[in-house]
Amino acid sequence: MLANNDLALRWQVALGFLAVLPITTNMAPLAASLVYSIDSAARIVSVQAAGHLTFSAIEGYAISLRADRRFSPTFSEIVDLRTVDSVSLSAREVMTLADGVDPFSHSSKRAFVVRSQDQVNAAHLHRILRPQTKTICVFYSIDEAREWISGTSGSGGCTVRQRLSLSGLP
């Protein structure tokens, strides 16, 4: 059973009052966090993920984002996965995230910033499940991701070096 503070936190997240989404289950320690910021002028959502990433954490982020009046589904997104320790998603959860939970439109540009092979694989799953894969790229730095999102990278889409690689990282 959730303590009153946990229940209050979940309601605040569901109503969009918090941009920091700590995920707790049955009074367990924090499993993951997703912290986002919205730059309405640039039409970009930046999200920093950390810890053990789960379906619940991603779903909570999507609920909070949809409730945020500054958000539009047509915005681009930069997802920084570099401080994610692990990802636990079943095949069904991945499909549910792509088909029903994801608050972004299929035409939105999505940049994933990674540091490990597991993070590349997690981004790759998302890319496979989105029909317009040219709108999803993986990068090794925030600067590269921002350049691609803003269209200042010199190449209209992902370059070969920026594209998902199943063997490009240690």
Image (cartoon, rainbow, N blue to C red):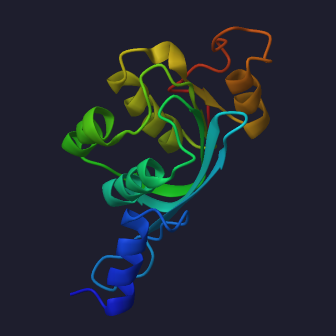
Q: Is residue 157 visible?
A: yes
Q: Nearer the viewer, residue 136 or 74?
A: 74
Residue drawn at point x = 72 percent, y = 33 percent: 42
- In the image, taking residue 147 as reference, residue 100 lies left or right, namely left
As drawn, 93 above or below 76: below
Residue drawn at point x = 38 percent, y = 58 percent: 60
Q: How many marks?
A: 0
Q: Nearer the viewer, residue 18 or 6?
A: 18
Residue drawn at point x = 56 percent, y = 32 percent: 75
Query: Outermost residue toward the front?
Result: 69
- Tell me residue 114's x, y (percent): 61, 41
- Tell me residue 138's x, y (percent): 59, 29
Where, quadrant-wise, is the C terminus in this rendering? top right
> Which corner quadrant of the image does residue 133 belong to?
top left
As drawn, 119 above or below 98: below
Q: Nearer the viewer, residue 27 or 85?
A: 27
Residue drawn at point x = 42 percent, y = 14 percent: 132
Q: Is residue 28 visible?
A: no
- In the image, taking residue 90 as reference, residue 55 lies left or right, namely right
- In the image, taking residue 119 as reference, residue 2 lies left or right, namely left
> Which corner quadrant of the image does residue 167 belong to?
top right
- Tell me residue 164's x, y (percent): 54, 23
- In the image, taking residue 109 as reference, residue 156 lies left or right, namely right
